[in-house]
Image (cartoon, rainbow, N blue to C red):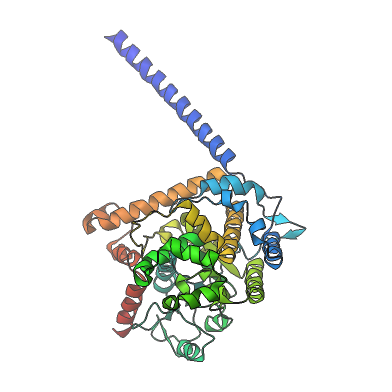
Amino acid sequence: MPLLRYQSIGVLKLDGIVNIVCRSLLFAALLILFSTSVTFDRNHLTPAFMVDDMIRAIRNNSINSVLSDAQTETRISKGKSTIRFHAHMAPRLSLRGGGQDYVSLFWKPFASSESIIFLKTHKTAGSSLGGIFWRNLCLRDGRNCFLPPAKNPGRTWDLSVQRDWHAVQSGASTLPAARFPYDAWLSHVHYHPRLFHAVKNASRILSIIRRPALRFTSAWKWYQHEQKFQLTLPEFVHAVKNGDNWHTFWRRQPALSDFKYRTGLEATTEELSGQQGFAAQSKSSQIQYFEELMERMRSGTLILLVTDRFDESLLVLAKLMGWGYEQLVYVRLKVAPDKNVVSENLIQDLDDIQPYDFALWRLANHILDLQIAHYFQNSYHFQKELYDFQQLNHKTIAQCHSSEEKFVANGIFKDKRNLKYCEEIFRDNSDAVHFAWKNRIE
């Protein structure tokens, strides 16, 4: 018996040593894998260089030549993190170049006294992102947030129109005693310089962009255009690609004049530039407005997150806002059932007929890589943080779906008062506005 016992203990000790060695080897292998798959090169391009490339391409009418390699760079799976994009692009990106230091507004954290403008774009996960801002700024921090009318909470504001501007000036706040100007703007709006008058102490705008082909496809399905116009998506793309130009196409299809800008081509560029009907304007006008938009990107006064890399963008947002990951928990809102798979060829065609949106989206991806390289020590550190956040998000949402007793027992939050956080997570824009009006009146 003593001998048997001794042998058992010896085996246990040996197993323990083997286990430690195996774990160490596995950890080392993972570290090598992540380090080789994503390398942050800090000695090449800058945001300014990338913007200049885009502008030169637009001016020379050769934007497709600058974007040609993007066909292989941006095969991004819908709803998935873009590790492949990192592996291909990160080695070509940097923080500095050309003798200029661009550690600037792109990654300068927002001060507690700095107001926030979130320019919400359509069909880009803007509702999910807007919900995060609403919970943290309007509810948690108690800021003076602009409160849209309850009868039309999701309207898109045009501050160049006096009626809209006067409505904003005389509008309501989430704080009953507060008024214009506000501390935060979280609604749909066409870009206009008046935004910086509507929101005091704001010097930057945050927004979000999605791969144009996927955004357009989402809008096409969400607004049921095929049924409404008796026109399939491939037929639409074929007509645009083979028509004389945008103007003639719409004249040939009068019913399509009902298209809203949010569902049309170059929609995100239109919203961020503030130029309604951008896709229908002359080439020279498009170049002018796009250059102005690029200048805001160059200066860092416009910071774009990327829908296709939503979780990665949230990690950067956490650094900008000084938030913990528990403040970024979200669910996908306003998602239409994806019944039909869109072919890769059609996706490429939709990108091709939206060159400005595609250029803007590609630039936003570049700058997001730069921000990640700035904020995280190395690729392993970034991947670990990304994994930890995704696990936290999944766990919290799962607990929110469970009973109140189980939720409290698991200790996600400190006390029962925070159970309302679950309700806030699942509230879309309209519900949040109506709830704010109700509390305001009470």
Q: Position of residue 57 (x, y in %)?
A: 69, 63
318 or 303: nearer the viewer: 303
Residue at 39% x, 77% y is 154
Q: Quick check: 405 above or below 259? A: above
Q: Quick check: 300 above or below 313? A: below
* 73 left or right, relative to 391: right
Q: Quadrant of residue 100?
A: bottom right
236 or 145: nearer the viewer: 236
Q: Position of residue 146 (x, y in %)?
A: 44, 80
Q: Position of residue 217 (x, y in %)?
A: 43, 62
- Which quadrant is home to the N terminus? top left
Q: Quick check: 63 above or below 192? A: above
* 406 left or right, relative to 65: left
- Which quadrant is home to the C terminus? bottom left
7 or 224: nearer the viewer: 224
Residue at 65% x, 61% y is 63
Figure label count? 0
Q: Quadrant of residue 419?
A: bottom left
Q: Residue furthest right?
A: 99
Visible in this render: residue 114? no
* 326 left or right, relative to 209: left
* 213 left or right, relative to 391: right
Residue at 52% x, 32% y is 29
Q: Position of residue 377 (x, y in %)?
A: 59, 48
Visible in this render: residue 358? yes
